[in-house]
Image (cartoon, coloured by chain):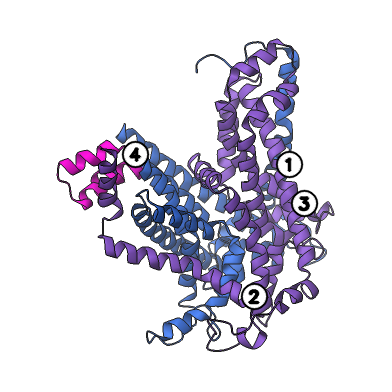
Chain colours: A purple, B blue
Amino acid sequence: MRVGSRRVKQSYLSNFIGFPTRIIILLILFVVILFPFYWMITNAFKLEQEYYSSPPIMFPSRITGQNFIDIVQKYEVFKGLINSIMIATGATIFTVAFGSMASYSLINGALPRRLKGVFAGWFLVQKMYPAIVVAVPVFYIIRSLRLMDNVLSLIIMNTSFNLPLVILLMIGFYQEAPFEVEEQSMLDGCTLPQRYLYVTTPMVKSGLIATGMLTFVYSWNEFLYAVILTVNKSKPLTVLIAGFITDKALIWGPMAAMGCVVVFPVLMIMWLMQRDFIGGISAGALKG
Amino acid sequence: MLISRHIHQTASDRIWSWAFLLPVVAVLMIAAFIPLGYGLVLSFFRYKLTIATSRPAFIGLQNYFNMFRDEIFIKSLTNNVVFALLSVSIELGIGVMVAMMLSDDNRMSRLMTTFLMVPMIIAPVAAGTLWRMMLDRTYGVVNYLLSFVGIPPVSWIGDYRIALYTVVFVDCWQFIPFVALLVLSSIKSIPQSFLDAARVDGASPWKVFTKVMLPITSPVIIIVAMIRFIDAFKIFDVVFVMTQGGPGNATEMLPTYIYRQGIKFLDVGYSSATAILFIIAMSLIAWVFLRLRSLQLRRLG
């Protein structure tokens, strides 16, 4: 029965335009999605005369590591990498710590009931509002606090962007955690921070890791505030790669190499936690 | 669960509960509320930092009126609306189709689903750079590939009539997968018996699509449409690296315009007013979508 019914779903939904057409469309889609990555990787390893050739060379005849050496020597990729790691890690730590504390308190704490609704509503609004609207005031505030070009300001901004989503997701995790254990430890005289730290949070650890990874990726990819709030020494990778474009000459090889450095950590994270990732993104979106 | 989760409230619990909320409130105050309030205040002032001795002068709503006489503002507003409508409708159309094509649970579909995630999680800046490279008029691989089917080189970035659609294309490349994944997870939740019943009644695939699938997935589709529509008004990264708002003002959008006015030209008052108007418009759009969704949910019961 199950096998039969599964075939129904297949023929009625997935093959709604006929099997051959479907395969052709999916193939085209596949190529369009992945070809840019092929192009990026091959260009990153092409010799200068090959990435500057017109017509372009589809299959490089020789590969070189020169572009990667170039971005290390001329374009400060290490500094950018360290900045990106610091910003994303810092934002992740703060977001997960603060976010889990707040969601724990909203679910298991002794707060007025109505407060939970108020906060949930607030975070929903906060999650949707466009970051650009506070860009100009933030720029002037950070400038007058002399925090320009400081990774700390970017850590704070990224934390604030990710907190709403993380809290909304974590409220769900804490709600699902069994309350009996919490109750028992309450009777045993554990204080609230003890229960948070040793009893309930360990039960939602996998959720925290998933949201943490999501925060890491979003902060790693963040560009708007990175470009506004950095001048020189704290530029992350996203700003460095954009710098290749604003120059008059477009140096494809090193640019593609830089692209690899920006993209691969994120792809690795995605590969490590595939399922949680889809779950996180879709839950995060649909909670809206 | 109707039982209250905090039965044994102690004073210490109560204090700690509030203390646990404090860091979040502090961060959001510093990074969101204070700047927003500051921006609102600034929007009533004439305040340009291009002149070193400039002092803010109160001018009431003048900044807001000026917007409607500002041709570049109007231009970026229309660009942004065109961009949002086009990209969202294309993404929804193709995304729903792709989701349906991947809705069977076999190996190939699962593999495709994994690959679908790749564009949507890479940095938009990287996506913009990648396509900037591929769409270059002389060195770009896209023009080269198109030459095989006899299409002469197109200036994807440099032609003011085309540039906006190029940005739409890159946005679609990144976010059709997003739409497809969300709709796919909603299609998978359709009870099998519904589809069986439809088959027994001899419904055509098109009927199943319009009478079974669309109604059930419509709340999700509405939310996805809202997210993408609002995101379309946040577009900054891709425009910044691909076209810089050019050629001329052909791809200037609201975020890039606010950035240019506030950060580049240091016109603090005016750009703050633009930002405030922007957030009001966004809230209205979100409200309309949420209203639509709750109506739809009520209709479905």
Pick the front one: A281 or A61: A61
Residue B176 visible somewhere in the drawing: yes
Chain letter, disc 1 residue: A
Principal secondary structure, stretch drawn in magenta = helix
Q: Mark 4 — residue? A: B296
Extent of the magenta region: B190-218
Q: How far is disc 4 from disc 1 in space, using C-alphas?
A: 38 Å
> Residue A18: horizontal and vertical position, in percent?
25, 60
Q: Nearer the viewer, mark 1 or mark 2?
A: 2
User: Is B210 colored magenta in this rendering?
Assistant: yes
> Sequence-wise, which precedes: disc 2 or disc 3?
2
Q: Mark 3 — residue? A: A153
Q: Are marks 1 and 3 in contact (CB under 8 Å)?
A: no
> Sequence-wise, which precedes: disc 1 or disc 2?
2
Please give the label number shown on residue A94.
1
Pick the front one: A6 or A248: A6
Left or right of A171, for residue A8: left
